[in-house]
Amino acid sequence: MSANQSRPPPLPRPRVAAMRGYAPGEQPAPGVRVVKLNTNECPYAPSPRVAQALREFDVDSLRRYPQPMADRFRASAAALYGLRTEQVLAGNGSDDILNIILRAWLDPGDALACPAPTYSLYPVLAQIHGARMVPVPWADDWRLPVDALCATGARLTIVANPNAPSGTLVPIAELRALAVRHDGLLVIDEAYVEFADESALALLAELPNVLLSRTLSKSYGLAGLRFGYALGDARVIAELAKVKDSYNCDALSVAAAVAAIEDQDYARQMWARVRAERARLATTLTQRGCEVIPSQANFLFVRPPGGDGAGLYAALKARGVLVRHFAEPALADRVRITVGTPEENDVLLRALP
Ligand SMILES: Cc1ncc(COP(=O)(O)O)c(C=O)c1O
């Protein structure tokens, strides 16, 4: 054994050594054929305009650093949503946006409140930043626990709307009621909002403590691109910009992201197809004896007859269909199934035990 191997490696910050890190959904090895319905990706290819933008991209320009604030994307997004450019922040996926928010808003020991269960990245980010995670149970039927969230006094509250993994949407009026009473920053994680009936965009005009987090991963078929953004009060965006990585969005991804959001006709067609399949899948699963929570996202949270979520996950996997199972007790009786193409959904339905 060399001297190097016998010497223990240096230790990171104690809270990093103690944490397990985020567990992403399984990614099958290259070449392995599965019907992949486990990470809420879009079943359709991105707009042809994305391919065109990448083909026409000036490779020579990669010699230069990209624009630090992804100005072309900011301008397109601002025009699309009727906001000012200064109200948009671009990120390397919305996970980057969420990380930037925690970095800017929470000192060690500060509270991050979330209705729970929800997106499993939030507690991991809280651990990284030494923040105190305050999970507040959802009220019955996945309604927003407004009073309990206000009572936490947290500097930062994140509500995923639609929520993951339930797929449920809380009415914007309830989010407004929370924001009005909340002293801190209220982040509404709208990763799935394009599949839902309403968004909280209108709240930005009246409430400076509301920030929306969005992504191109789900609704624009671009999970592999890594592009997300925040919309909010220009003063909040300016604070967030101080702590982001200097060049957090590369020039290629900005070109592709702009092409994607500027092709709203194509995107809207995809969303409509996903919604139609969501309805068909929910109806058929219900007819097969499953309990399906009404979803406003591109996935369904499904309790099979008997409630053996782990068993259903394993049986589907053995038949080449990947869905997601969460081991934590409150979620373990269900699986989360991403809505696929009609053909993929048929394979899933045939593979049900
Ligand atoms: C609620 C929620 N927010 C954010 C994300 C992150 O998306 P991305 O980093 O790909 O933009 C996900 C992904 O699963 C999610 O479920």
Image (cartoon, rainbow, N blue to C red):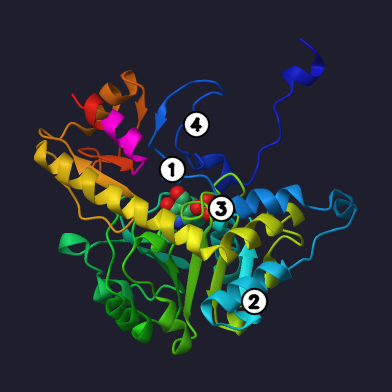
Circle nearer the N terminus (1, 2): 1
The answer as to whether callout 3 falls within 8 Å of ligand 1 is: no
Amino acid tagged 3: Ser
- Picture coordinates of residue 254, whole percent (x, y): 69, 59
Q: Quadrant of the C terminus?
A: top left
**Which residue is denoted by mark 2 in the rendering?**
239
In space, the residues marked 4 and 3 are separated at their CA atoms by 23 Å
In space, the residues marked 1 and 2 are separated at their CA atoms by 36 Å
**Which residue is denoted by mark 4 in the rendering?**
27
- Identify which residue is drawn at 71% across, 69% down: 72
Left or right of 63 in this view: 93? left
Circle nearer the N terminus (4, 3): 4
Amino acid tagged 2: Glu
| Residue 125 magenta-highlighted | no
Left or right of 307 in this view: 183? right
* Count of marks overlaid on the render: 4
Disc 4: CA contacts within 10 A as few (<14), some (14-19) or many (>=20): few
- Picture coordinates of residue 242, whole percent (x, y): 70, 72
Circle nearer the N terminus (3, 2): 3
- Picture coordinates of residue 98, whole percent (x, y): 54, 61
In space, the residues marked 2 and 4 are separated at their CA atoms by 35 Å
In space, the residues marked 4 and 1 are separated at their CA atoms by 15 Å
Disc 3: CA contacts within 10 A as few (<14), some (14-19) or many (>=20): many
